[in-house]
Image (spheres, grey):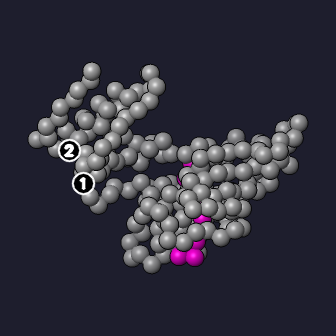
Amino acid sequence: MDSCTPAVPDELHLGRVIAVSACQAVVLLERSHSAASDRDLPLEMGTLVKMRTRVSIAYGMVTGLRVPLPSLDASDKDLRLVELELVGEIRDTDAVADFQRGLSAYPALDEPVYLASARDVAQVYARPKVVATPVGTIHQNGAVPAYILIDELFGKHFGIVGTTGSGKSCGLATVLRAVIDQSPNAHVVLLDP
């Protein structure tokens, strides 16, 4: 059994790939996921899913959920589509299962799609092998830390944007506190006109 096949076959199976583009895929949810099971199925924006390609396990993040032609009454006969952003893969040939961004091969049409397990989420969001500092946890699993790559972040231009009250200052304070904890000799100048 490969690592994309779940231990309990139908528990984590979501549906099948019905469209693929350069960085996106569309999944048709199986009819077994009725309106009642939707409440039990943790499928929402940002959920991580996985599918096989010919050389790897590809991971996608849910970016859209829709019913293209809804019936007038709530029905499990509606077509339910999940839009995915293809974020990366773990190649079959790697001795160590390291997640890498981007895909070297794309999933085929009708490829089964599964909900990513806690182990998958931990692999995708594992601490990078370069200088990184934790800034919190990911929303998919509060036990998995979220890291920033310090050299990548400060070696390029970046911005923290959002509407009034969205937490820009709090986010910046969290990032700066984490960086200073990691590098106590760092010098920070903050201008807030």
Q: Secondary structure at mark 1?
A: loop
Residue most toward the bottom?
Answer: 93
Are the residues flagged by discs 2 and 1 in contact, CB closer than 8 Å?
Answer: yes
- Residue 182's tag is 2
Would you call the spot at circle 2 few (<14 residues within 10 Å), some (14-19), or many (20 or more)? some
Q: Is residue 80 above or below residue 54?
A: above
157 inside magenta stretch: no
Residue drawn at 86 percent across, 49 percent down = 77
Residue drawn at 88 percent across, 36 percent down = 73
Quarter containing the C terminus = top left
For residue 49, say whether it is visible: no
51 inside magenta stretch: yes
Residue 102 percent across, percent down from the top left: 47, 63
For residue 161, say whether it is visible: yes
- Residue 148's tag is none
Residue drawn at 69 percent across, 61 percent down = 19
Q: Is residue 126 above or below residue 104?
A: above
Q: Amino acid at mark 1?
A: Val
Residue drawn at 83 percent across, 45 percent down = 69
Where does the magenta region start and end? 47-55
Image-quadrant location for residue 39: top right
Gap in angstroms between the C-alphas marked 2 and 1: 9 Å
Q: Secondary structure at mark 2?
A: helix
Residue 121 percent across, percent down from the top left: 48, 55
Q: Which residue is mark 1?
A: 131
Please state which of residues 16 and 63 is positioned toward the viewer in this rendering.
Answer: 63
Residue 150 percent across, percent down from the top left: 26, 48
Q: Amino acid at mark 2?
A: Gln
- Left or right: 111 as drawn, with respect to 184: right
- Left or right: 25 as drawn, with respect to 140: right
Would you call the spot at circle 1 few (<14 residues within 10 Å), some (14-19), or many (20 or more)? few
